[in-house]
Amino acid sequence: MIDVFLLLGSNLGDRHLFMQQAIKLIENDIAPVIKTSSVYETQSWGKTDAPDYLNQVILLQTSLPAQIILQKILAIEIVLGRKREEKWGSRTIDIDILFYGDAVINEDNLQIPHPELHNRRFTLEPLAEIAPAFIHPVINKSILGIKSELKDNLIVKKFYF
């Protein structure tokens, strides 16, 4: 079984409900969720005038190939109303593959580890909560080590509902 870390994000509608629904669909279509981070509220990144996001990292264990996981999460996004209209646009749900074990994958439609995760506080805060010692297979540092060197100063705080 391979440890797969996914980042969930939502900034439209009932953000928390969309994330809960995404987790249920992931468990039905891909694999049971082994661990979840807290939910974090985050200023919008990239398009700063958009509504704040909720973000959460989840850990799955599966033997499914990364490309199959990608196909399944893209289908889940569509089921939950995701529309891809503009880069960094608002969305009901966004699901990114952060890590697929220690694999390094560079394909046209899939890059793992996620190519921007080391630059984004909204990814590193929840990831460091559930996997602080996980070693990034390209940067060769722990998640906690990467987070400690982070320059991103967006506000990321735990979300209580």
Image (tube, rainbow, N blue to C red):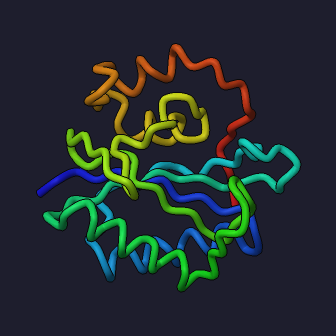
Residue 119 horizontal/vertical position (percent) = 56, 29
Q: Quadrant of residue 63?
A: bottom left
Q: Residue at x 45, y 38 (%)?
A: 115
* Quadrant containing the C terminus in the rendered view: bottom right
69 and 16: which is toward the camera: 69
Residue 70 to residue 114: above or below:
below
Residue 112 to residue 78: above or below:
above
Q: Quadrant of residue 70?
A: bottom left
55 lies left or right of 46? left
Residue 120 horizontal/vertical position (percent) = 58, 34
Q: Residue at x 72, y 61 (%)?
A: 86
120 lies left or right of 27? right
Q: Residue furthest bottom?
A: 79
* Quadrant containing the N terminus in the rendered view: bottom left
Residue 26 horizontal/vertical position (percent) = 38, 74
Q: Residue at x 16, y 53 (%)?
A: 2
Residue 25 to residue 144: above or below:
below
